[in-house]
Amino acid sequence: MSTANSALPYIIAGPILRRVQPEEVVIWLVTREPLQARFSLFTDKQQLTELDCAAITSTLQVGEHAYIHLIHYRADTPLPHNQWLYYDLICQVDGQSSALGELVPALLYPGETRPGFVLKMQLDHVLHGSCRKPHYASEDALLRVDQVLAQSVNDPADRPALLMMAGDQIYADDVAGPMLSAIHQTIDLLGLYPELIEGATVSNCKELYNSPHNYYERESLLPHTKANQALQERFFGGARKPIFTADTAHNHLITLSEVLAMYFLVWSPQLWPKLKLGISDVAEPHRDRYLEEQREIETFSRGLDRVQRALAHVPVYMIFDDHDVTDDWNLTRGWEEAAYQHLFSRSIIGNALIGYWLCQGWGNAPDKFPLSWLEQFRPGTANKELIDSLLEFETWHYSLPTAPKLVVLDTRTKRWWSESSQAKPSGLMDWEALSDLQQELLGEDAVLLVSPAPIFGMKLIETVQRIFTYFGRALMVDAENWMAHAGSANVILNIFRHRKTPQHFVILSGDVHYSFAYDIKIRFRKNSPDIWQITCSGFKNEFPHTLLRLFDRCNRWLYGSRSPLNWLTKRRRMQIRSRIPEGREHDRVLNLSGVGRLRLDQQGVPEQISVLPAGGGEISFPPREKADP
């Protein structure tokens, strides 16, 4: 073993507990060398199994000292529900046998000898959220997940059934300078594989990392031709956004090694002690910004031991949204035509999607992903074959046979193009995908539906987006809401109105960087289904406070329960009642970083809807009688 290898921690990232069902347990982790380990599973009273990991693990080597593993244990008999289960990996490291608690002592809660979890098929307690930007100036709400788990370490009944991450687990398009520096040091430490770069003024990773435009100026790497001007503005510079902030993509991740390094760094503290966030490579005009971001990144990194511990102790499910790949991903037909026809942007999107598959999607439903993808990975190349396979893949969505049934939507890759204009927003799901969704819902009494973007959002913001769309400026305001495309809007609303679909719909969403809860009924119908739109965003991000306060007030004035403007919206046949955050009688939205908490009864009806703010406490959204959209 080389000196450089032995100086690295054996576990680079993880373990993250992923899909947990009566017949299977899935664990994701990254190690510095091939995994030689035995997997064990226990109850309080007995050992259930012990297996050689070689028989149940799929592995991809992504660097000289980096191996991504997915351990997929399949049980011969159903695992017990509603009681403690514990797992361990006895790894052969430097000639010795070491358990997880010995390799990563901070991984365990006080009194534990190995990581534990509870298998719940009844979703009575769910944590959820989205949008975790490391350099945003707030605390990291995933630390609240760790706190919840620590408080329930002696109470399996109160343990969350799962943590749902509903999008933007990383920001591939909005990267702080210090984070990019940490990423490049990680690439060097792990020897992450280089690749060829096509369609840019640099041809490989070495040229990119040594470029004077490597920090804060990556839009300059595109060839300066007229054909690329629109792509530069759309893909890197970002259209100026008077509602949602201005361009932030100057450090956009480009290579697969950059994407993988970011995942390792945002989920684990293991490599951070070996990193130095100096500014020697940063040009003078960007140094003040770098130093400001450095303070936030250093604070973020200090909490990662508790994030790592939390993700090892609760089943974690994920789905992508735009920032996991790039801002405005597939927003319009024109965007898609520009981005996928250019070699450079196609490879950037493809690399982000490879990273998503390896670090997020794979663990949601391992059997959906062909093992041939592992064989298509070609270090040192542009990975065209693998990127093509991922871009053509149509089953990123998934479901769990829980009560209520958990159905997680892919609202990014199967979009419904506008037929009238390439500049108009696409529908979030096309007719075929929505038809498949309806078939999956038939016969269910209740469903927990995860849509990264809210299906029922703030009407005023949707109206502003519609106005900009009318003038061909959908990209300026992120005009991607369910109501922005007539076809997808009508179909999803008809699904709710269909008499054979569930009586109880709970919709969990993120994306918008604020939190709210709506109670929804179908007007003029006695046996309307009960629908709840519950949105929590972000884990570490917020909406501009003054602007959101203005939108919230104006939305209440313009779209009050008696306003005739309601009849101009696509949701006019729905009665929507907004809940008021506890202790904030003048607000309908909550604008702070936090984790959503949802408690459900046996019928799948919310008993409590709340947000756990990153700074502490709990803010509930109690039901109310008076209608007020």
Image: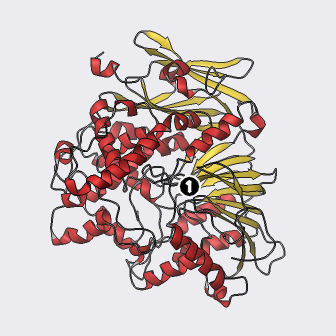
Q: Position of residue 31 (x, y in %)?
A: 41, 27
Residue at left offset 18%, top offset 56%? 200
Residue at left offset 74%, top offset 48%? 403
Q: Position of residue 524 (x, y in %)?
A: 79, 81
**Quadrant holding the N terminus:** top left
Look at mark 1 in the image and give the residue it sits on.
593
- Which kind of residue does numbered mark 1 sit on? Ser
Q: Say above or below: 542 vs 595.
A: below
**Quadrant holding the C terminus:** bottom right
Q: Say above or below: 608 vs 568.
A: above
Using residue 233 as the reference point, say whether residue 151 is left or right of it. Answer: right
The front one of 437 and 143 is 143
Q: Quadrant of residue 517?
A: bottom right
Residue at left offset 55%, top offset 71%? 548
Q: Is residue 305 visible?
A: yes
Seen as rendered, the residue at the extreme bottom is: 564
Q: Is residue 369 visible?
A: no
Number of callouts:
1
Using residue 14 as the reference point, say whether residue 385 is left or right of it. Answer: left
Q: Say above or below: 56 vs 158.
A: above
Q: Position of residue 159 (x, y in %)?
A: 72, 38
Q: Position of residue 585 (x, y in %)?
A: 72, 69
Seen as rendered, the residue at the extreme right is: 526
Q: Secondary structure at mark 1?
A: loop
Q: Say above or below: 389 vs 308.
A: below
Q: Quadrant of residue 179?
A: top left
